[in-house]
């Protein structure tokens, strides 16, 4: 084997410490381990983090089930709109669903834990702010669901000078004022935590790329990439200037 990828858990801990230094003790950590923990290995990293963070966040219900099958008991939030035919899994496996579309209310099984997801500027997943009143009506229409959280996602928080963050926060605060005050609220991804923590982080934060050692924008002291790729040099050859290399002779 000529190449090996090493994952340094000690650096993962240091990166988590950087995140912790940005937030108060009562703010919960929701570690984003989607896409196999950004290619670093979801299960081993989740096992390392399970007693160091309160939540895990994943992209799909399949990833959430993987965590449960690996013995992870932390709350798990799934970002995707629940897939048709798989809605029952959320209640069965104690997994939190995202209600990002009004159609989801009637598809989830009673007892399912839910976080309401509003789009305040990303323009991808999420209910529109104008749908807040309708969402409240749907909550009354489907009282069997456990409405426990409310969140949004920053579109452009990658640096200290990001004017859209304040705009999104204002929209989110307006939305939040219309819902029960006991909902668990969260807005900040890695960029929100690292560059805008002074603006208010609500009840939870969702660090992702920062845990793996990368700054989403301006460099942050203390973050260290947890992955180290080592490979062996297998051949050295000398070629003449102008000779072509590789398929299609594209490199000279």
Image (spheres, grey):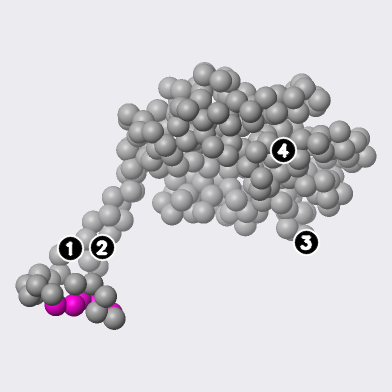
Instruction: List x then y, in percent, for residue 88.
Output: 77, 54
Q: Earlier in the sequence, mark 1 or mark 2?
A: 2
Quadrant of the snapshot with the C terminus:
bottom left
Between circles 4 and 1, the one closer to the viewer is 4
Between circles 3 and 4, the one closer to the viewer is 4
Residue 13, can we see it?
no
Which residue is under mark 4? Answer: 118
Instruction: List x then y, in percent, for residue 80.
Output: 67, 51
Label 1 close to label 2 by CB (< 8 Å): yes
Kindly report the distance in space between the C-alpha atoms of the residues bearing marks 3 and 2: 41 Å
Dot 4: what SS?
A: loop
Dot 3: what SS?
A: loop
Q: Earlier in the sequence, mark 3 or mark 2?
A: 2
Q: Earlier in the sequence, mark 3 or mark 1?
A: 3
Between residue 64 and residue 173, name the one nearer to us: 173
Kindly report the distance in space between the C-alpha atoms of the residues bearing marks 1 and 2: 7 Å
User: In the drawing, what numbered circle is on residue 85?
Assistant: 3
Q: Earlier in the sequence, mark 2 or mark 4?
A: 2
Which residue is under mark 2? Answer: 3
Kindly report the distance in space between the C-alpha atoms of the residues bearing marks 3 and 4: 24 Å
Count residues near mark 3 (Cα–Cα under 10 Å), then give few for <14, some for 14-19, many for 20+.
few
Residue 38, can we see it?
yes
Question: Residue at the location (28% across, 59% down)?
Answer: 4
Label 3 close to label 4 by CB (< 8 Å): no
Instruction: List x then y, in percent, for residue 84.
Output: 77, 60
Which residue is under mark 1? Answer: 232
**Which region is colored magenta?**
243-247
Quadrant of the snapshot with the N terminus:
bottom left
Label 2 close to label 4 by CB (< 8 Å): no
Between residue 163 and residue 144, name the one nearer to us: 163
């Amino acid at each position: 084997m000529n190449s090996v990828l090493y994952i340094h858990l000690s650096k993962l801990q240091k990166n988590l410490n950087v995140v912790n230094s940005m937030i108060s003790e009562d703010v919960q950590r929701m570690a984003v381990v989607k896409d196999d923990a950004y290619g670093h290995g979801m299960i081993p990293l989740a096992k390392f983090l399970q007693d160091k963070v309160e939540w895990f966040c994943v992209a799909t219900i399949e990833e959430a089930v993987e965590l449960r099958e690996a013995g992870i008991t932390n709350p798990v939030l799934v970002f995707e709109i629940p897939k048709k035919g798989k809605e029952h899994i959320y209640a069965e496996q104690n997994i939190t669903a995202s209600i990002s579309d009004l159609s989801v209310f009637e598809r989830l099984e009673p007892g399912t834990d839910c976080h309401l997801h509003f789009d305040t500027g990303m323009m991808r997943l999420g209910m529109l702010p104008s749908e807040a009143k309708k969402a409240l009506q749907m909550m009354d229409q489907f009282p069997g669901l456990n409405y426990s959280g409310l969140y949004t996602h920053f579109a452009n928080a990658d640096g200290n000078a990001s004017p859209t963050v304040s705009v999104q926060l204002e929209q989110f605060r307006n939305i939040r004022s219309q819902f029960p005050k006991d909902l668990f609220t969260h807005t900040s991804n890695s960029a929100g935590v690292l560059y805008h923590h002074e603006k208010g982080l609500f009840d939870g934060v969702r660090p992702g790329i920062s845990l793996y050692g990368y700054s989403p924008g301006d460099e942050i002291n203390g973050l260290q990439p947890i992955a180290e790729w080592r490979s062996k040099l297998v051949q050295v050859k000398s070629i003449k200037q102008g000779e072509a290399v590789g398929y299609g002779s594209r490199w000279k």
